[in-house]
Structures are given as C-alpha cells and as structure tokens.
Image (cartoon, helix red, strand yellow):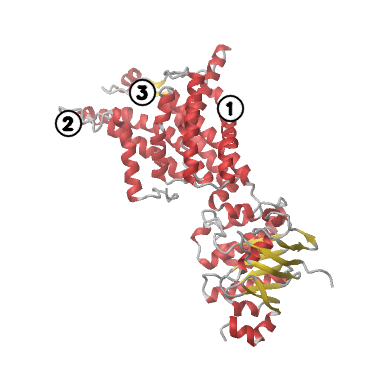
Amino acid sequence: MDLLNALVAVLNFVVIPATAYGAQLALGALGVTLIYGILRFSNFAHGDTMAFGTAMVILLTWGLQGLGIALTPLPTALLALPVAIALTALLMLGTDRVVYRFYRRKRAAPIIFVMASVGVMFIMNGLTRLVIGVDEIRFDDGARFIIGVADFRRWTGLEEGLALRGTQVITVAAAALTVAWLFWFLNRTRSGKAMRAYSDNEDLALLSGIDPERVVRQTWIIAAALATLAGTLYGLDKSFRAFTYFQILLPIFAAAIVGGLGNPLGAIAGGFIVAFSEVAVTYPWRKIAAYLGWESDGLMQLLSTEYKFAVSFVILIVVLLFRPTGLFRGKSV
Amino acid sequence: MSAPYLAATGMTGGYGKADILHDCTLTVERGQIAVIVGPNGAGKSTAMKAVFGMLPLREGRVTLDGEDIGALSPQERVRRGMGFVPQTHNVFPSMTVAENLEMGAFIRDDDDGIARTMDQVLTLFPVLADKRRQPAGELSGGQRQQVAVGRALMTKPQLLMLDEPTAGVSPIVMDELFDRIIEIARSGISILMVEQNARQALEIADIGYVLVQGANRYTGTGAELLADSEVRRTFLGG
C-alpha cells in the first residue's frame, strides 16, 4: 500500500506537472529551434512573443466572456487562440519587415541578429505591459479538474490524493497535435520541404527556385503560432504575468540547446528533460521517502523552488561543455 | 551557321575593383560538352559563375538560345533552362535523396513530367534509387555528386553547368561520372564544366577552353588540345 501511495505521490507532484510543463517548454523550444534553423539566429524575443500572444488571447477571452460566449467545459481561451495567433503573426511579420529584413539583406552576422532580437524583446516586453499590465492574470474558466483529490481518494482508498487538471490534459493534447502537424508539414508538404531545404543550404535553395522571403514569412507565422499556443497553455496551467514569460526564455533555450538547436525532435525531448529535471530537483521528496520506509528530518529538497532556473543553467552549461551540438545532433551554437 | 546555344563573349569583370576575367569567351552548342581547364587561380570557376550571373560583368554579353540574359538573376536563369551544380555544398544534407531531387523540381508544376524526370535520373544513377530514403549528407562523396547532378537535372535544364564534378572522388568514381556526363549530353543537354582533371575531361570534350589568368589561352576540340604539344607541356604535365 505504501508503495502505491509513493507512486501516486510521484505521479501527482512530479510526473503530471512536469509533463504539462515539459509540453509547454517543448512548444516554446520548437519555435526557438525553427527560427534558429531557418533564420539562423537565437531569437531572444521569443519569450515576449509568447507573452504578447497570450495577452492577445486574454483580451479576446475577456471580449468573448463579455458577449456571453463560452466553450464549457473547455476554457474560452481556446476559442480566442486562432485570432490571437493571427494578430501575433502580423506583429512578427511587421517586426521582420522593419527590423530583420534589413539585416538579412546586408547578410549580417548571426550575432547582429541576436542583438537586434534583444532590442525587439525589450520593445515587445514594453508593448505587452502597456496593453495588458504587469499584474498576475488568471484566465482559465474551463472545468478545473478532471480527477479531483477527494474523488481519487474515495475511489482508490489510498491516503495519497491525485489531481488531474483540465488544463494539464489540454496542454499535452494540444502539444501532441501541434507537434504531429508540424512534422507532417515539414516532412510531407512542398512548403515544409522548401523550409527544410532553405535551412540546409540557403544558396542551393535559391538555385532550386525556392523564394527565400516566402520561407521567412512562413517561419514567422509558424513561430507566432507556436509561441502563442505555448504561452496560452502555460498561462492556463499556471497564470499569466508578463515578467514570468520573460524568465521562461531561459528554460526554453536550455531545452532547445539540449535537444540540438535547429532539430525539432531535439526541442521536444529537451523540453521534457528540462521540465522533469526542474521539477524533480525542486520537489521535497521527504513524503515519498517516508512511504518507502526512510524517515528523514529534512525536506529532502535539493533546491528551493526560487532557484529553479539554476537547473536550466546547469543543464545548459553541461551540454555546452560536453556535447555542444545537443543530444540530437543539432547545429553547434 | 546559327548562333551557338550558349554564347558568353568578351566577359570582363570581378568581385572587387580588380578584374578576374579579361575578355573571356565561352560558347557551347546544343548537346555539346564544353570543358574549361587551366591552372589554379585561372578564373575557371569565376568564368562559369559569370555565365550563371553570379559575378557582375563590366563588359561582355551572355546569350542563351539567342536571347541576351545578361540582366537576369541566377534564379531566373534556372527558369530559362540553366542548371548549375556548385563545387561544394551542392546537396541538402539533412534531406533524403528523393527530397533532394524533389527540391530540384521545385520550379516545375507538371507532376507527371517531374515523375518522368525523376525516373530518368534514377535510371541514370541507379545507386540513388537504392538510397532514396537516406539523407544525402550520409552518402559517400561520389554518391553525393550524383545527387547534386541529379538535383540539377530535375530542373530540366537545356544547359548543365558543373563546377569540378569530380573534385574529391576516387578515379573509378570519376570515370563513372564522366560516363554519365556523356550520357546526359547525348540526351541533348549541353554541358559546360570546369575540371581539375584536365586530361580525362578533355578526352570527353567536344570543345575545350584553356584559361590562364582569366583570359582564353587555347581553344579547340578536346582532341586538338590533347594533341597540342604546347598545351600538353604547360598544362597536362607532358
């Protein structure tokens, strides 16, 4: 019985939250990796793109709620997503037009693009705060729980409870669908193959008659969609705060680099690796140890949650030192 | 006699202030194999790039099938029937062989025709048919060159330009590649190629150009150049 209790506790406090968080990081890292693979720079503005996209979702959600439109039991935010993605994509295309295209034409070095993206990051950061403010916003209005703690205890008779929130299931399902679609698009469609060709060999793509500006536009649109989706899922699962999205850039980059920059499969694996490490290292294991017959005075928590970003840093440093191209043979940084 | 299919005449120009090409002329008839040879730094590749529109020319004309194409970008020249195989970085390494060929046909929208060209390419290079699902980056040097040539053939060119197609491949593979190039030319496609292996290349050449310092030094059929004692002594090593 104690073994079962331990298992349920691990599921409840580690596996389920880390899976949802991992899916959110994976979607974020996919956007970063796609931009790196095709436009050849690390986009520091990606976190704030997520924030902007989510802000759009929230504004639209409020609008829909005002009109009395809901999607129960699903959160209204899902209904707002397509329009928010379109708005974010427009912002991305606009940014590309006024900022990145200039450097692309000059064939600027990647580091110049990165610096430009830092500038874009600050502007988007400010823009999001102007539009929606700096406070914490909760906008999940769907059914809270699919499995409640009390219900679970009643069903199983176990001491430990297990909760499965609607947003967690939506997160994983949406991430799986998006990833499946993205892989289908990249591997099966003409446009997707053109994007991969451009990523592989820009000059040869040009010689094959592939229009680079079209590839760039498609990349931004897909990146906007991934960012908005990742941001919204994260916000539904936890809450929205502009600053949190700026911070989440670090684990997202860690995920993309662990997996191998430019490699979509790697971004997904990286997302889960970072998420599981972060949750496992910051979780107090005392209760589970007790179930397994090992009493401890301490919390058995390796790091307090305030230091969770240290986990990303450590992973990042270890990977860069020992395997700079990442686990899945991406491009070296 | 009508004008040659490709006529690049009096090409003069370079990347910066100094000219690399000096009054260089290259012509290719339909179905002919034209070979550019010469010492290192003679501007062989540069001459080819100039023909393809990758080098700004101060003087000179490039006509294809009688039309002046001097103002067209390389991409537009591809659409006009010029296929180009760069010396290096000439495949999409992470994409499969089949996808590489497909990308070659990107500018075409006749699905039946694309499938037919794909069959022709795979008949020409049977080894690619076995490896069609393998990423091009994992192939050997010779196989990669075949993918590169195959990709260019997929654009359905009238003129195929090859920049040192046998660079870095073994002598056996080189012979085989030359055989394939002859086959391509027999199907009516003109070939313009730069070659480091001058002797072997001139053996299959209908017309050969020996460039020295960006200018034409000797021009003749492959056999004539091979028979010319001066050419042999200075460029073919005796």
Q: Quadrant of the N terminus of chain B?
A: bottom right
Q: In the image, what residue type sits under mark 3? A: Ala
Camera-nearest residue between A153 and B132: B132
State the separation of the CA atoms marked 1 and 2.
55 Å
Q: Residue, x 41% and y 36% (percent of image)?
A: A252
Task: Bin the neighbour count of mark 2 within 10 Å (Cα to Cα): few under 14, some 14-19, many 20 and up.
Answer: few
Return the disc, 1 or 3, that comes first in the chain's sequence.
Answer: 1
Q: CA distance from mark 3 to mark 2?
A: 24 Å
| Location of residue B104 (image quadrant) | bottom right
Q: Which residue is outermost to the right? A: B1
Q: Residue at x 42, y 22 (%)?
A: A239
- Could you say where residue B192 lies in the image, as x and y percent from the top left? 67, 69
Q: Relative to residue A253, is residue B98 drawn left or right?
A: right
x then y, percent, for residue B229:
64, 87
The front one of B182 and A155 is B182
Depicted A41 relative to depicted B208: above or below: above
Q: Residue furthest toward the front?
A: B17
Residue hosting label 1: A87
Task: Give the secondary structure at mark 3.
Answer: loop
Circles 1 and 3 on the same chain: yes
The amino acid marked with disc number 1 is: Leu
Q: Residues within 10 Å of mark 1 (few under 14, many from 20)?
A: some
Q: Position of residue A120 (x, y in %)?
A: 50, 33
Q: Taking the image as drawn, is residue B157 in sight?
A: no
